[in-house]
Image (cartoon, helix red, strand yellow):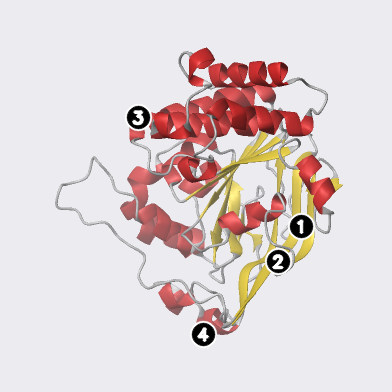
Amino acid sequence: MTTTANAPASSSTSGNEPYLVVDDLTVKFPTADGLVHAVSNLSYSVELGKTLGIVGESGSGKSVSSMAVLGLHDTRSARITGSIKVGGQEVVGLSEGKMREMRGNKAAMIFQDALAALHPFFRVGAQLAEAYLVHHPDASKKQARARAVEMLDRVGIPEPHSRVDDYPHQFSGGMRQRVMIAMGLINDPSLLIADEPTTALDVTVQAQILDLLQDLQREFNSAIVMITHDLGVIAEMADDVMVMYSGRAVEYGTVRTIMTKPEMPYTWGLLSSIPDVSSDVNTKMVPIPGTPPSLLTPPPGCAFEPRCTHRDKVAGGLCGTALPELRPASDGHGHLKRCHLTDADSIFQTEVLPDVAPATSEEN
């Protein structure tokens, strides 16, 4: 597949058509203080059997863009333009009835807070069965319960025949997350959006959840969008990576390229912020200075310019006055960057790499 600066596509050479295609998506929210530009001109695609990792700080637009895919924004207030196609079906402007038919059937979402997403007053099995019956109205309650037990077993819940009658509070954090995965997959959707599914879980349970998602992806051949701020998770799960900042994509490429040859200073900052267990105990982490800009009044130039330690390498103060386009990086091969630096690869190799070498050793 080919990749353009306007619509990044999966770098896979399998020849499959993307199942999810997001083209020039913009999401704005009117507030008492003004219009919030949550997502601006975002484009990406994901093929069946592949995983796209979306990474960035809180407020960068990761979850907002993915909620738009499932039509979870209040259309009475949210202003959504652009195109979102799921399995060839246009989502933007779709009626609520048609959206309900698609949501949970063609595409599903795993939310980061399983305890909040599950209803505390209903048994886990009843909630799973309800999700199944919505899209299988001809099925009996007995069949729906059997499907719920089957999915609990498939995601590794012990004694599913008895645990199906438990309430969410009777499950541990990791088990509740498994229940959310079971709910997301109960109708065999082709697209699964995982919104920080390992947040607040210890590293052992986190590894189990990631292994489970990979096993289920191989079984269902589903396309996965993995939203996270953890580059370690991205290195483990993703085929391609999109780095977001201030509502825009600032870098896009294969996981190996983003981890070893990034060309956007914001990506360098994310890599430098990863703690290294093999370093000296007195070694300090290198945080990104400053804070993200307000989405109420986006800056005219590069949104990262006030925090960028390399902006003086661009002549004429261009970083602060002109928004850089998302264009091919120096190595090509579908690698895109939104940056005015022309020698970013050289700067990374000579100035930045020593600080992030442990992080870039990750391979997918």
**SS for dot 3:** helix
| Residue at the image point whose x is 56% and y is 75% from the top | 295
* Residue underneath mark 3: 204
Crowding near pointer 3: few (<14 within 10 Å), some, many (20+)? few
Residue 356 pos. (x, y %): 35, 51
Q: CA distance from mark 1 to mark 2?
A: 9 Å
* Residue underneath mark 2: 26
Amino acid found under the numbered disc labelled 2 = Thr
Q: CA distance from mark 1 to mark 4?
A: 30 Å
Amino acid found under the numbered disc labelled 3 = Thr
Q: CA distance from mark 1 to mark 3?
A: 37 Å
Q: CA distance from mark 2 to mark 4?
A: 27 Å
Amino acid found under the numbered disc labelled 1 = Asp
Crowding near pointer 4: few (<14 within 10 Å), some, many (20+)? few
33 or 238: nearer the viewer:
33
Instruction: Indicate which disc, 1 or 3, sits on the residue closer to the N terminus.
Output: 1
Q: Which mark is residue 23?
A: 1
Quarter-wise, where is residue 128 in the image? top right
Marks 1 and 4: which is nearer the front?
Answer: 1
- Asked if marks 1 and 3 touch (Cβ < 8 Å), the reply is no
* Residue underneath mark 4: 317
| Residue at the image point whose x is 78% and y is 21% from the top | 139
Q: Quadrant of the N terminus?
A: top right
